[in-house]
Image (spheres, grey):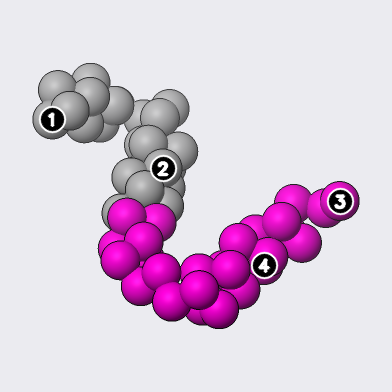
């Protein structure tokens, strides 16, 4: 199974079962992951890690 297929199945599960309360959690986790990936190799990394 490809990763895209798993992600699309997860989002269709959320939509079908009306798990609307999970959407904000998913969005926040994606944004935090993106923040860590984008700033992981930069000079800003020590400052971002102190936030958490």
Count of marks, rendered view:
4
Q: Residue at x 74, y 51 (%)?
A: 3
Q: Residue at x 37, y 66 (%)?
A: 23
Q: Quadrant of the C terminus?
A: top left
| Horizontal relation, residue 51 to residue 8: left or right | left
Residue sticking out furthest to the left: 51
Question: Which numbered tag is attached to residue 8?
Answer: 4
Of marks 3 and 1, the one in the foreground: 3
Count residues near mark 1 (Cα–Cα under 10 Å), then give few for <14, some for 14-19, many for 20+: few
Can residue 31 be seen in the rendering of this structure? no
User: What residue is disc 2 on?
Assistant: 33
Magenta span contains residue 15: yes
- Give, as a single range, the part of the protein colored magenta: 1-26
Of marks 4 and 2, the one in the foreground: 4
C-alpha distance separating marks 4 and 3? 11 Å
The secondary structure type at the circle numbered 4 is helix
The secondary structure type at the circle numbered 3 is loop
The secondary structure type at the circle numbered 1 is helix
User: What residue is disc 3 on?
Assistant: 1
Magenta span contains residue 22: yes
Q: Earlier in the sequence, mark 4 or mark 3?
A: 3
Question: Which numbered tag is attached to residue 18?
Answer: none
Q: Position of residue 33 (x, y in %)?
A: 41, 42
Question: Which numbered tag is attached to residue 51?
Answer: 1
- The reply to whether discs 4 and 1 touch (Cβ–Cβ < 8 Å) is no
Q: Residue at x 60, y 61 (%)?
A: 10
């Amino acid at each position: 199974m490809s990763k895209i297929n798993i992600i699309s199945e997860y989002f269709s599960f959320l939509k079908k079962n009306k798990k609307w309360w999970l959407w904000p959690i998913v969005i926040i986790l994606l944004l935090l992951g993106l923040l860590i990936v984008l700033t992981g190799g930069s000079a800003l990394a020590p400052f971002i890690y102190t936030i958490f």
